[in-house]
Structure formats: C-alpha cells, structure tokens
Image (cartoon, helix red, strand yellow):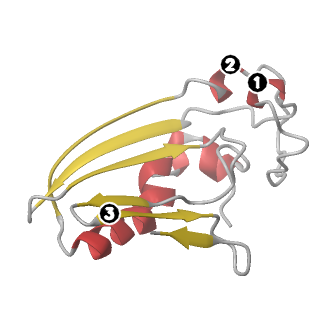
Amino acid sequence: MEKPLATTVEDADRRDTTGLLLQKGAHDLDVIHWLAGSRTGLVTAMGALGVYGRVEDRSPGLDERFDPERNWPPLGQRGLNPVIDVEDLSMVLMRLDNGVQASYQQCHYTPDYWRNYTVIGTEGRLENFGDHRGSSVVRV
C-alpha cells in the first residue's frame, strides 16, 4: 500500500523526486496500457498543490506513515514536512495508439486508500472496489 503525499522529505521536496505522478502513478499507467492493449500516443495533464500547501503545522524531520483516522480531514493534519512543493492532485487525459481514450487521476488527500479502476466499453463496465487481498471485489 502506498503512502500519500509528503510523508518523507524525499516525497515532498521537488528537488528530490520526479513528482508524484511519475513516482507513484507509473504502475497505474502501465495497467491502463495493459488493459487497453496499447500505449499512449497523445497526452495532456495538469496538477496542483491545492491542499497540503495550505497546512501550516510543520515539523522538521518527521517521517510518519499515513493514518486515515488521525490525518482526516487533510487540512487538519499536524506535523507535515517543512517543504511540500509537489502536486497533491494530478489529472491525465490520454489517447492511446489504438484509439482508446483513458483518464487517470491521482489524489493524495482522499480518505479512500486504494486504487480504483473503471473500464467502460461497448460491452459493459468493469470496476474494482478495494485492492487488498481478501477484501477487494470486481464488479462487471
């Protein structure tokens, strides 16, 4: 299970990362390519530091893991990294080489702590709920 934004200095400071979209989303983008049977040919994306940059309570050297009970709502968090300058929300629109259109969103302040894939096609819809062994379900 991945941790959210800004739980270590390496994740929160742009000087030390490629950005969370590539660092944490690369495998999700691979899954999209695998499910669609094609690679991205055209892409547009945007992101913003819209929430965690507004949290004022910071603690140098803190390295705690995400706890949804303690860290919700996101603006109420305490002891965040002194430097947070990476996006906490990213959105990507893709057109794959075979014509499939896909979108990907990465939100680091959601209370939901799993990956969700939804595939909608000419024959129906497939969606997962949860991504932990024994507790996830896929509906068609």
* Nearest the eye: 56 or 121: 121
Q: Is the N terminus in the top left, top right, bottom left or bottom right quadrant?
A: bottom right
Residue ID for mark 2? 54
Residue at (75% x, 37% y) in the render: 81
Q: Nearer the viewer, residue 64 or 66?
A: 66
Q: Amino acid at mark 2?
A: Arg
Left or right of 77 on screen, residue 74: left
Residue 68 picture location, percent across and down: 82, 46
**Mark found first going from the N terminus, 1 or 2:** 2
Q: Residue furthest bottom?
A: 134
Identify the secondary structure beneath mark 3: strand
Residue 122 location, quadrant = bottom left
**In front here: 75 or 118?**
118
- Give me the residue at 53% from left, 58% from top: 116
Residue at 65% in and 62% down: 2
- Spot occupied by residue 31 in the image (x, y as percentages of width and height): 38, 71
- Cα gap from disc 1 to disc 3, whole angstroms: 38 Å
**Label 2 vs label 3, nearer the camera:** 3
**Does label 2 or label 3 sit earlier along the sequence?**
2
Along the polypeptide, which appears first: circle 1 or circle 3?
A: 1
Q: Residues within 10 Å of mark 3 (few under 14, many from 20)?
A: few
Please give the residue where the numbered disc 3 appears in the rendered image. Answer: 124
| Mark 1, secondary structure of its residue | helix
Circles 1 and 2, Cβ within 8 Å, touching? The answer is yes
- Indicate the secondary structure of the residue bearing disc 2: helix
Residue depth check, mark 1 versus mark 2: number of the one nearer the observer: 1
Residue 39 in the image: above or below residue 52 = below
